Amino acid sequence: MKCTGRLFRIWCLVFSALVLFSLSASVVCAAGEDAGVKGLWLRIPEFPDDAEVDEFSADEDGEVTYIRSIDDGRFVLGIFRIPAGDEMTPEKLKETIAESVTNRGGDADDIEFDAGAEDFAELLSYPCLTAEYEIGEDEDATKFGVIGVFTHKYVFLVQAAVDEDSLDDYSDRTQVWLEGMKLVGGAESGEEKNEGGEGRGDVFNDETSENDGKAPDFVAVVYSMPEFQGVAWHIPAPGEYDLGSGFGLPNDSVCSVAVCPGYRVTLYQHSEFGGESAEIEDNEEDLGDLKRWASSLKVEQIEEPDPDLALAWFEVQAENEQGFEEIEPAPKALKTHAERIKRFQAAGEMNWYGTTTDAERVKLGGELIGIFTDLGVDMSNWEANTFAQMMNNFYDWRKDLSVWDTACLILNVDPETF
């Protein structure tokens, strides 16, 4: 599931709030006598220390109100749970939202309903309603995002409000937080489940369950570019991996690492786990000085993974397919280098190695740097010798590409562009 554009920003905002106010899970999902869905659950390790509880209430009928804010009220989150009934239908909730917007000085006709309802219904396996709107004008406007979830026993409502000038600050959260939301509690069917289960249970009911018993297909990913881009190798299980011996990425090419919760990746400077080492227990989008440094690595399990966190991590990384850097080559540069590019496109691994010397390959590396620079690719971090060495590493790993395609793969540039 992916939300894009303005809608993505609003819903990332909403679920970033759920992350920030993780205590809401323990409140809304408090154990009760019924075996139905009790609440919304989302867990992520980062949240601010200054989140204030503005209001909390819970009654015997199952109604819960939980409101928190940060930054002196620039961001406010409300989570509400009310018993389901004939009087609380999606249409009735829309009427209530419209009436509230009007009473607060907004225009009910400008409310955008259900732009994300289908996506959230697919995620949660229950009917959902979404709404987004704003109250006020220009820099004084406040943005609102609302989600209503209709289970058999309860209706859950999440509303986030943020000042217009703070929207970017709170919407730059990862989509893994959004996709980590779960409905929790027992089975809607009334069957006894989750005894002693800490208030968390089946994600969905029996008829719609997709995640029960599902385990990640891999536990770590290493990428040839920062920010989890470029060539990716999905490491299937704990073990020892030496570049050049069963490794899915060239030597000295790891630039970012994603690690499943509960696991640790140790990078080693040399092959056969020699030299200096660095331990990583979280996602590292840029290895900094350790970029293109590792020649072997170990993956180990350090604790029993939380199944929900592990699955949420896996789903994000599984969608992290290679996306090439977008460039628009200048027509003049393309024309200037057209003949040389064609020669590189026709040359293969034997043309790169063949009878060439190290010095000649370094010269070719410098020539490639010059061509790509003219074409608009940022080559500021490359020198002729380092690029030539990376070409060697990629050819040691994969021998079926042309010289040009290999260079493009190193730079995460689509060769079809040329």
Image (cartoon, rainbow, N blue to C red):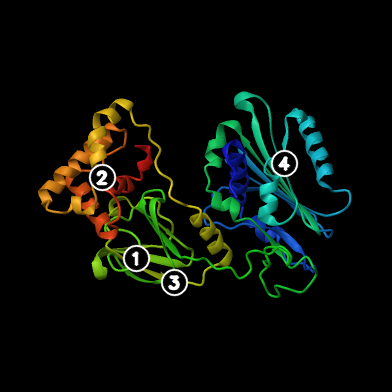
**Given the image, on which type of amino acid does mark 2 rest?**
Ala
**Given the image, on which type of amino acid does mark 3 rest?**
Gln
x 83%, y 60%: residue: 60
Which of the two discs, 3 and 2, sits closer to the camera?
Answer: 2
**Given the image, on which type of amino acid does mark 4 rest?**
Asp
Q: Mark 4 — residue?
A: 114
Which of the two discs, 4 and 2, sits closer to the camera?
Answer: 2
x 26%, y 33%: residue: 338
Q: Earlier in the sequence, mark 3 or mark 2?
A: 3
Q: Mark 3 — residue?
A: 301
| Cα–Cα gap, marks 1 and 3 | 11 Å
Q: Earlier in the sequence, mark 4 or mark 2?
A: 4
Which of the two discs, 2 and 1, sits closer to the camera?
Answer: 2
Instruction: Judge left or right: residue 76 versus residue 259.
Output: right
| Cα–Cα gap, marks 4 and 1 | 45 Å
In this orientation, does residue 237 appear? Answer: yes
| Cα–Cα gap, marks 3 and 2 | 45 Å
Where residue 33 sits: x, y (%)?
80, 69
Q: Mark 2 — residue?
A: 346
